[in-house]
Image (cartoon, rainbow, N blue to C red):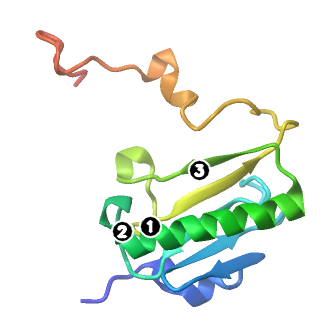
Amino acid sequence: MMIACDFCDIETLRDAEVFLENESCVYAANGFSTPDVLPGSGIIVPREHRQSPFELTETEWTCTRMLLLQARRETDRRLSPDGYNLGWNFGSAAGQQVAHVHLHVIPRFADELHAGRGIRWWLKQPENRRLDPTQRGGGSLS
């Protein structure tokens, strides 16, 4: 059975402003043309359909790392960011919107409105707390 997946069509990713590839993975990054994403943000995607990073092969892990280092060199050269956020979203509760694993590579800049707030900042806010279901009598919030 064929899976309908945008990231399985590597050719569509080739249209990115920056496109890098190796034997197992590709990297695609936008420029300044996508207003809802920080400039230079990209993703590393395995060529084979995998739903989570837990399914990656050793070769795919190695190739992901190689592309990550290459993407950083290219982004540093082009944009000189002040830092990076790297992240995987796995599962709908974690925000995964495409069921093909992809590593987000997000350059960060000191002059951003939210500079200094890491990928876990909003997760640590008091309104995001939930009861500990492992504690006696804790239960869940539902």
Q: Are marks 2 and 1 in contact (CB under 8 Å)?
A: yes
Q: Residues within 10 Å of mark 1 (few under 14, many from 20)?
A: some
Residue found 85% across the figure and 36% down from its top: 110
Name the quadrant of the N terminus. bottom left
Disc 3 is placed on an element classified as: strand
Disc 1 is placed on an element classified as: helix
User: What amino acid does circle 3 point to?
Assistant: Leu
Question: In the picture shown, does residue 7 fall above or below 32?
Answer: below
Q: Residues within 10 Å of mark 3 (few under 14, many from 20)?
A: some
Left or right of 104 in this view: 61:
left
Sequence-earlier tag: 1 or 3: 1
* Residue in the foreground of this view, choosing between 105 and 76: 76
Sequence-earlier tag: 2 or 3: 2
Residue 129 % position (x, y): 39, 19
Return the mark for residue 56: 2
Question: In the picture shown, does residue 2 fall above or below 106?
Answer: below
Return the mark for residue 86: 3
User: What amino acid does circle 2 point to?
Assistant: Leu
Residue 70 % position (x, y): 69, 69
Residue position for label 1: 61
Q: How far, Cα to Cα, is label 2 from label 3? A: 17 Å
Name the quadrant of the C terminus. top left
Sequence-earlier tag: 2 or 1: 2
* Residue in the foreground of this view, choosing between 66 and 38: 66
